Amino acid sequence: MKAIIIDDEPLARSMVREYLGTYSEIEIMQECNDGFEGLKAIQQHQPDIIFLDIQMPKINGFEMLELIENPPHVIFTTAFEEYAIKAFETHAVDYLLKPFSKERFDKAIKKLLQQQNTTPTQTQAVLDDVSQSPAQSSRIVVKDGGKIKIIPVAQVQYLEAADDYVKIFTADGSFLKKKTMQYFEQSLPPQQFIRVHRSYIINAQLITRIDPYEKDGHLVLLSTGARLPASKAGYMKLKEVLGI
Amino acid sequence: MPFLTLRLCVKPNKPLTTSPISNNKFKLVFAAGWVAWAMVHYSVLLNFGITHAEAICDSLISNLTLATCCIIVSNNMRYYLPKQEKYWYVLVISFGMGCVWMIAYRSLLWLFFHKHTTYMQVLDQSSTIRFGIAFLVIGFMATINLLWYTQKEQQEADERKTEAEKIARESELFKLRQQLQPHFLFNSLNSISALTGSQPEKARHMIEQLSDFLRGTLKKDEQQWSSFEEELQYLQLYLDIEKVRFGYRLQTEITHDEGTLQMKLPSMLLQPVVENAIKFGLYDTIGEVCIAITTKNVNGTLEVTVQNPFDKETSQPLQGTGFGLASIQRRLFLLFARHDLLQTKTINDHFITTITIPQII
């Protein structure tokens, strides 16, 4: 079994390594300092299990998971109790609260060995489930070619539905993310991002004009020059948020 | 002891502090005014063709009874003050006491002079005006008392409010001082746990450091001010622990002006600022992170600067100062009533927090 440890604290990694010492069937392929290294290592080694910290430099553990097509089994190791629910919603094998004992660790490994035969693609499905109740976040992490791009939500101009993806428009161009419109509608600050149309969510701070358009619709003009349609319901929402 | 508690619960309604009459200055004015009024009363009566004895007696009796009525009204208001319809209360009580007074002084005078026909005639004829005057005098007394007590009540309410605000402020300050991040503690314990296997000596050392740090937290909860030297020791302890956790990634650079070591600052103010800087610096960049702490004596005020790197592209540090800094700002405001003591700015890739501490003690 191939394993990767991803944690920004060297001592925390050495702890997992030490505990794994008693399991000859699990081989540690690599230890990573952060999510970027983690992503690369996962692509390279295709591990069966990752030990993942949540609070890490640049992108956190959840954001890293979102960027993987078929995530492996995950055991979270963190001092943060408050993420437990979210972690279990991702169908993590286990959630270890630091500092954890060898006994507790063994229990997690036992669970892992039991689940070994189930396909970890499940994790992906569940990551989408989580999207039903996402926490409000202040940034969006996307893959841009081989690179990882972190977009602060304030820099998002608008979002457009594109089949299974959502296209995120910023001053630096547009990026695709495999999420639903509903996910973004719920996770972006509702006072700033308004779903004006089945296929569009716009940043209300950029609106410069709203013109009537066709029968019941309106056309929203953004300061970036983009013209986006607003449905009747979307227009009502706009009026409510903008107070007009 | 249920009996005792019961007794305490049914404590009688406490009278309002003191009545205006208990004030010595007021007593003097009250007495002098009344003597003067009694003399006027006497000389007016002489004009109606009655004897000196009758006039003196009349003036004494009617004014003494009227003064008594006034004192009764004042004392009564000490125990009972209507919350609403205050002015109606004054009118009613003036009228009522006026009637009581009429009956009292007339009965007394009748006892003495019911055989003096001329005098009794004058007495009857002057009833209306006497009642009018008594009504006004009692009304005047009642109004003064009403204003006095209302003002007293207001004063007491204000004092209670100030006291309550003070308590709230103290407890808020206490809470703000006490914000030790539990994550810090758990992560440190995890590091210790990791060290016990491989490097038990180091683990022991870290336990000592963590204990000293926690002891400092407990001790400093009680005191409001520390010297920068004390704060620096405490900070050093914190940084040493963090360095064990983050290894080579965390570098620190502390520089201070000679004269700043003895300067005072609110205790445990710097640690959360540095914690914020570390969090910001370490989680927003990859590779080594240098946290620089500088203190300066600027015209007698202590200026502390904490600097950390950050990524311009992905963070907007100026938007969210984060909870760490918000609570510092609040604390500084509660202590100095100023909003401008904590400033943040960004220069290139560095986020700089500057705290100015006036030396008021």
Image: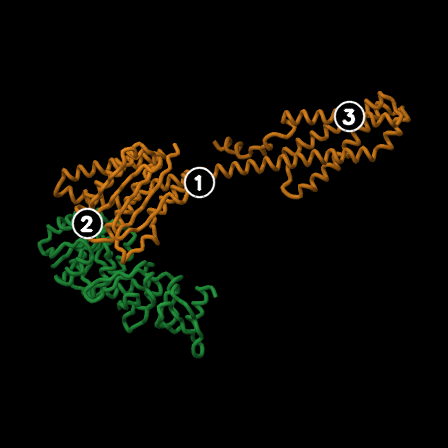
- Residue extending farthest front: B299
Name which of mark 1 and mark 2 comes first in the sequence.
1
The image shows a total of numbered marks equal to 3
Q: Chain of mark 1?
A: B
- Judge left or right: residue A61 versus residue B15: left
| Residues behind callouts 1 and 2 on a single chain | yes
**Distance from Cα at disc 1 to Cα at disc 2:** 43 Å
Q: Please provide percent x and percent y for residue B233.
A: 25, 35
Figure quadrant of the N terminus of chain A: bottom left
Q: Which of the pair B40/B17 is nearer the observer?
A: B40
State left or right for residue B243 relative to residue B173: left
The residue tagged 2 is B288
Which circle, 1 or 2, is nearer the viewer? 2
Give the amino acid type for the residue marked by disc 2 in the picture: Glu
Label 3 lies in what chain?
A: B
> Which hue is chain A drawn in?
green
Same chain, labels 2 and 3: yes
Q: Which chain is represented by orange in the image?
A: B
Residue A159 in which image quadrant: bottom left
Q: Which mark is residue B168?
A: 1
